Amino acid sequence: MLFFGFGKTTGQDIHFSFAEQTPLLLNPAMAGANHEMEGIVNYRNQWSSLGDPYKTTSASFHSRINSVKRRSGNILALGIRLHNDRAGSPGMVSNAASLVIADHVKTGQFSKIGVGMDLGVGQRYIKSADGRWASQYDGTNYNPGSASGETLENTNFRYFDAGIGILYSYEHRTGTLAKTMDRMLNAGISAYHVNRPNNSFIIENADRLPLRYTFFAHAEMALSGTDIAVLPGITVHQQGNFSEYLIGSSVKYTLMDKTRYTGFQKPLSLTAGLFGRLKDAAIVKFVMDWDQYSFGYAFDFNTSKLNRFTNGNGAHEIFLRFSVSEIRPLRR
């Protein structure tokens, strides 16, 4: 009863500390917003010091489908989003797969407005046989061979899911033959589970998945005359009674800039950041970008009351990314 009551009252979507590296999880309009093509894989391992950790894996890919006609002022993009989430023991497993479509219209020389839609299917199931029940204790020892006395008529269900989003993006690249100076901003708002799909193992549609509203603003501002850029960001999730505020900033240092015409020298940069998840964790992030590839690691220092049991060991997170940026002349 406690287990299912907890799932009903506080059920929430997956989340990552590298929110800026999960574009389609933030907003479907992020498809095609900043890159001709982009693929990302994310992995998060949370609360391993408590026993069976929460393990979340996400993958996304999106690409513009009319890049040749981008100067017409309209950009179309398609994407796909996948995730798998395994929560503790007994294992509560969630899977999802979505098709994403987005359209971006230029509103200025460096800015555009985009809208996107996320259409997909989800699945949840519980491994009730992996649980430990009171009836399996004989008063002294735990006997996994004893009957649990617990039965569930439905341990697996599927549902259709839908989400929408709107995005403002700004990108102004300036530079010389030796240095690139980027100024970028993505800001958007989205709503997921707009059709309120079923979220109950017991009675179908008795508990519907709450809408998740997400607002975010992520920027990159190069400091003139230096090899340094500042990357501030804020991400806010609101789902039912649950809210999450992720705020902080990173500093990016360019070790090597790319050569403009020969392409012999590939760009290389290192980024370090400090973020906070309100009333939950302090987060340190490290990212290395080399040419079209990026790798990042983040660690959550748990700061909530749970840290008495976790000793501050909140979560480990990594991502791998491949991207192809839009090729266009630099503006002075």
Image (spheres, rainbow, N blue to C red):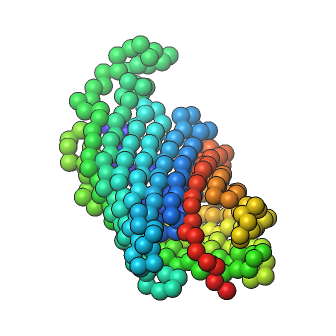
Question: Where in the figure is residue 231, as x and y percent of width and height?
Answer: 64, 71
| 154 vs 159, nearest the viewer | 159
Using the rendered image of the protein, determine whether residue 220 is visible from the camera's viewpoint: yes
| 20 vs 254, nearest the viewer | 254
Question: Where in the figure is residue 178, as x and y percent of width and height?
Answer: 78, 75
Question: Where in the figure is residue 176, as x and y percent of width and height?
Answer: 74, 80
Tell me the quadrant of the picture where the C terminus can be found: bottom right
Does residue 7 appear to the left or right of 311 in the view shown? Answer: left
Question: Which quadrant of the structure image shows residue 145?
Answer: top left
Does residue 273 appear to the left or right of 115 in the view shown? Answer: right
Q: How many marks?
A: 0
Tell me the quadrant of the picture where the N terminus can be found: top left
Identify whether 202 is placed above or below 39: above
| 321 vs 303, nearest the viewer | 321
Question: Where in the figure is residue 212, as x and y percent of width and height?
Answer: 37, 61
Does residue 196 appear to the left or right of 74 in the view shown? Answer: left
| 113 vs 283, nearest the viewer | 113
User: Which residue does the image show at 42% across and 52% down from the upper left?
Assistant: 81
Using the rendered image of the protein, determine whether residue 268 is visible from the camera's viewpoint: no
User: Which residue does the image show at 48% across and 48% down from the upper left?
Assistant: 58
User: Which residue does the image show at 44% across and 17% down from the upper left?
Assistant: 144
Identify whether 72 is placed above or below 10: below
Residue most extreme to the front: 262
User: Which residue does the image show at 50% across and 16% down from the upper left?
Assistant: 141
